[in-house]
Amino acid sequence: MLMNIVLLLVGTALVLWGADKFTDGACGVARRWNVSELMIGLTIVAMGTSLPELIVSLLSSIRGSGDMSVGNIVGSNIFNTLVIIGASAMAMKIAVSRVTLYRDVSLSFGVAVVLFLMGRDGELSRVEGVLLLGIFAIFLYNLFMAERKNKKNQTEAPEQPKDIEPVWKLLLLLVIGVVSLVGGGQLLVNNAAELARSWGVSESVIGLTILAGGTSLPELATSVVAARKGSNDLALGNALGSNIFNITLVLGLCNVISPMRIPLISTTDWAFLIGSNVVLAVCAFTRMRLCRLEGFVLLLCYAAYLTLLFSV
């Protein structure tokens, strides 16, 4: 047990250090290539920090444990919306653009509803997997077209910062950051799960809390660090992009490989998956920003979710 605790602390340190390096690299890439931080957050950062969910879900799908794959995604998305965005808002006020609210928050809500409708019969088919991948492709296409349009609307090219790092160094920071985030996250998840089992916690609760929260640690660390450094778009784009990627890309890919049965997702889990996006939209729409109070409300909703989960 002592070794598990030591490895858990090492994993936490790796995640935090990796988040700092990854954020620096992502912001540098955005400045170097004249791409918005929101675009970087929704693509490179979201993909990089979603690697744990992708790895865990693909392995579970190949082994025939579809319920664990979907449970991991559902739990991770609830964690992303309520804890990651909530903690980021607690760290620093986050301005929310109309594009983010109407496109990204809406899509995060939409794909959650689509997954619920697909999973009502207790399984996901290959055809449904292809449909999810199709939604992902459309999302990426619209994202790149919107970024291209924004560049055309710029009358003058912004002046390149003099102190910007070379491309090779920025890409190296991204790689180092991802490796540290994924490696540290796996150390943390594996040892936290072992400790939970030794304390008599059930496998289903471990999947929806420790596994889901652990695989979302890269997003949490990256978003909070980004918010503290003033990169609001990167913080919000990372969490929302991960939500969209988890359902459309990760589950889409898993179902194309092996159709999954999903018998263990409760009404409470589905309600919080969809409802968390509604709460986020309401909080963001009020003043087009997320302040500490609204961040606290999101965290409070997650505390309510955990209370319900452990009381069953």
Image: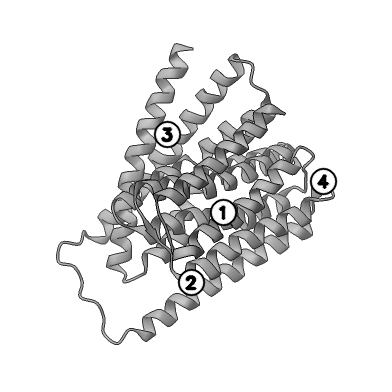
**Disc number at residue 281?**
none
> Whole-percent x and y of residue 288?
44, 65
**Image position of 158 (left or right of 143):** left
C-alpha span from label 2 to label 1:
17 Å
The residue under label 4 is 122
Residue 219 in sight here: no
Mark 4 neighbour density, 10 Å: few (under 14) some (14–19) many (20 or more):
some
Q: Residue at x 74, y 53 (%)?
A: 116
C-alpha span from label 4 to label 3:
33 Å
Q: Of residues 117 and 14, which is closer to you in this image?
A: 117
Q: Nearer the viewer, mark 3 or mark 1?
A: 1
> Whole-percent x and y of residue 226?
34, 52
* Mark 1, secondary structure of its residue: helix
User: Mark 2 or mark 3, which is nearer the start of the sequence?
Assistant: 2
The residue under label 2 is 99
* Mark 3, secondary structure of its residue: helix
* Residue furthest left as drawn: 162
The residue under label 3 is 184
**Disc number at residue 243?**
1
C-alpha span from label 3 to label 2:
33 Å
Whether the residues at callouts 3 and 2 have beta carbons within 8 Å, the answer is no
Q: Please, what is the three-letter code of the amino acid marked with disc 1?
A: Asn
Q: Please, what is the three-letter code of the amino acid marked with disc 4?
A: Gly
Q: In the displayed structure, would residue 160 be above or below residue 266?
A: below
Colour convention of the picture: one colour
Q: In the displayed structure, would residue 306 be above or below residue 51?
A: above
User: Mark 1 or mark 2, which is nearer the start of the sequence?
Assistant: 2
Mark 2 neighbour density, 10 Å: few (under 14) some (14–19) many (20 or more):
few
**Image position of 149 (left or right of 30):** right
Q: Please, what is the three-letter code of the amino acid marked with disc 2?
A: Val
C-alpha span from label 4 to label 1:
21 Å
